[in-house]
Amino acid sequence: MAFTPPTVEQLGLYLGLDEIDGNRADLLIASAISLCQTVVKPLPEGADAVVLSVAGRAYVNPQQVSYETIGPMSVQRPQGSGGLYLTKSDKSALKSLAGRGGAFTVDPTPATADPSPTWPIDDAGFADEFEPGWGYS
């Protein structure tokens, strides 16, 4: 099954909003998809969760406000908590969904490799001549 882009309604449900600006949400979803495609292209099935996360962050905090006070209430958000961006976790999730990013092993041995020795040996399994000083006569 291929990637299906999330809808404006899904973004509204994700954010817990009863009303959502459709044009703005469409723009953010399309931009989030483009941003995700810089990591993995084509986007794999399940990438809609990452797209919703990226678009949702941008929808609720477009100016990247880090500290806000309204009356007696104040809110401080971590740096980089707004705008349209991918976190390290987002990138990792996209790679994992695409089947990439894990450990792997490479065997450099050719398929035609022969396990027998390539040097000359006699019937006893020793080389015919030894260098002086090794205790063999």
Image: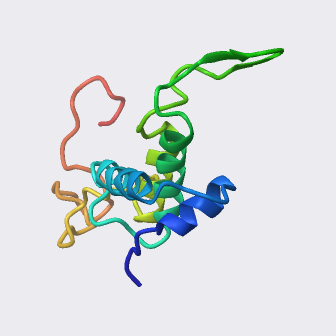
Q: Could one spot residue 104 in this view of the protein?
A: no
Q: Residue at x 33, y 60 (%)?
A: 124
Q: Nearer the viewer, residue 14 or 96?
A: 14
> Farthest residue in the right direction?
72
Could you tell whether 88 is left or right of 112 in the image?
A: right
Could you tell whether 105 is left or right of 60 in the image?
A: left
The N terminus appears in which quarter of the rendering?
bottom left
Answer above or below: position of 126 versus 124: above
Q: Nearer the viewer, residue 122 or 7?
A: 7
Q: Nearer the viewer, residue 7 or 18?
A: 18
Could you tell whether 62 is left or right of 71 in the image?
A: left
> Farthest residue in the bottom direction?
1
Q: Report x, y in % for residue 74.
A: 76, 17
Q: Report x, y in % for residue 37.
A: 29, 55
Q: How is the image coloured?
A: rainbow
Answer above or below: position of 13 versus 1: above
